[in-house]
Amino acid sequence: MHTLTVDELVDKDNHAWEEVRNILKEGRNSHQIVSAESESAPGDTLYRLQVSTKSYLGTVAYETGGIVFDYGWITLLGAGGSGIFGSLTSWNGLQEPESVPALEGMLMVAYDAAGGFFGLDIGKFERSGHIYYFAPDALEWESTELAYSGFLSWLAEGDLGLFYQTFRWNGWQEDMEQLQPGEVFAYYPPLWTQEGGGETSSKSPIDITKAWQAVVDKE
């Protein structure tokens, strides 16, 4: 199969970035677009992914280091940037050295502060093209039934408070400041136990790779 060059993948006539920016601007959820950490990262990320900037995934990879939503609660991966752990390539085994073990049949696209992960099904679940969520309260993948474009719209304007109702607690926005880049909250008792919950568990920062290990261990 022919590998496309960066020039072929950057569609100047039908670039989705303006569309994405409008969705972000009109959405009710806070967001911060993080610049890519180096000039070469966006083109390199696009090339390794082999997706066009006509797609939302391609344009996020090419135009951003990532996008952080809702006071830092959710991080959408891009080409990698300041305050973001990894990139679309490092999370998906597309660059050396690997910062985390990649999952077969899943393209990791986002993570959250509760140790939950969002992946695009590219073979694990019959190539549905849907985003799946590895829920820390269930320790399994659950379909959002959204394609990547719908997922991005949900991040910008969806009811994130409702989705994370049982994971969050009073004053969580202030507590987000405890997290360093590459850290998420560990809950004790864990969210998957009967006693675990946003209000009932104690929370402490842990390295995101430890939270990711729970995903890898379930494979």
Image (cartoon, rainbow, N blue to C red):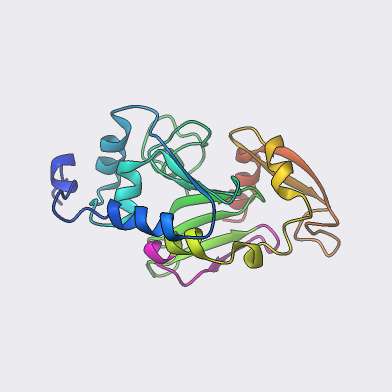
- Residue 21, given in percent of the width and then of the height, sits at 36, 52
Residue drawn 40% across the image and 29% down it: 37
Residue drawn 30% across the image and 58% down it: 19
Quadrant position of residue 39: top left
- Residue 23, given in percent of the width and then of the height, sits at 39, 59
Q: Is residue 96 magenta?
A: no
Quadrant where the image shows the C terminus: bottom right
Q: Residue furthest bottom?
A: 145
Residue 151 relative to residue 62: left or right: right
Q: 195 above or below 206?
A: below
Residue 146 relative to residue 187: left or right: left
Quadrant position of residue 203: top right
Q: Is residue 145 magenta?
A: yes
Quadrant position of residue 137: bottom right
Residue 82 appears in view:
yes
Numbered range of the magenta stretch: 136-150
- Residue situated in front as seen by the camera: 178 or 147: 178
- Residue situated in front as seen by the camera: 94 or 217: 94
Residue drawn 78% across the image and 57% down it: 198
Residue 106 appears in view:
no
Residue 175 relative to residue 132: left or right: right
Q: 164 above or below 84?
A: below
- Residue 147, given in percent of the width and then of the height, sits at 39, 67
- Residue 82, given in percent of the width and then of the height, sits at 48, 30
